[in-house]
Image (cartoon, rainbow, N blue to C red):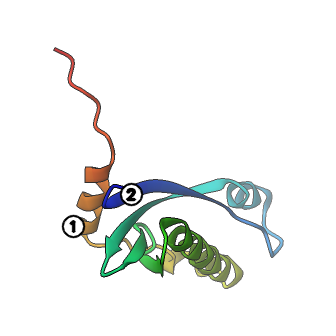
Amino acid sequence: MPKHLAFAQHHMTENRVVLPEEIRRQAESAIIFNCLIKFEDGLFVAHCLELGIVATGTTPDKARSELNDLIAAQMDYAFSNDNLENLYHPVPAHVWQEYFACIPQPEEKK
């Protein structure tokens, strides 16, 4: 099993308030978050790179599920409280570097 797993997590937003048509359409679209799962100290640690949210689990699926729940709660809070400007808190550059190291790179054509 690889030491690190990288994936993109899709989230659908819900409208809980009445919004102008253009904003409502944007809020109903999918938002993609980049996530990284690492195995550290006997646990799987899942990072949402754009939101700076971290979750743990005994398996990659449990860590991912916990992270998914936390992302949904963070988004629900931000939309419900009109606090979108504080939604994004990107992780440090070294975590992004770990993420990109996990993604297969295209082979160079010779």
Dot 1: what SS? helix
**Residue at figure coordinates x 39%, y 57% from the top left:** 5
Q: Amino acid at mark 2?
A: Leu
Front in this rendered view, residue 104 or 52: 104
Q: Amino acid at mark 1?
A: His
Q: What residue is shown with label 2?
A: 5
- Pointer 1 or 2: first along the chain: 2
Dot 2: what SS? strand
**Residue 78 image position (x, y, % from top left):** 61, 79
Compared across the picture, whether 64 is left or right of 28 comes to: left
**Residue 46 image position (x, y, % from top left):** 43, 71
Q: What residue is shown with label 1?
A: 94
Compared across the picture, whether 13 is left or right of 52 comes to: right
Quick check: marks 1 and 2 in contact, CB under 8 Å? no
**Residue at figure coordinates x 68%, y 53% from the top left:** 29
Q: Is residue 8 above or below residue 51?
A: above
**Residue at figure coordinates x 36%, y 55% from the top left:** 1
Front in this rendered view, residue 12 or 80: 12
Compared across the picture, whether 57 is left or right of 22 comes to: left
Q: Is residue 39 above or below residue 99?
A: below
How crowded pointer 1 is (Cα within 10 Å; few <14, some 14-19, many 20+) is rated as few
**Residue 23 image position (x, y, % from top left):** 71, 60
Q: Quadrant of the C terminus?
A: top left
Any mark on residue 82, and which?
none
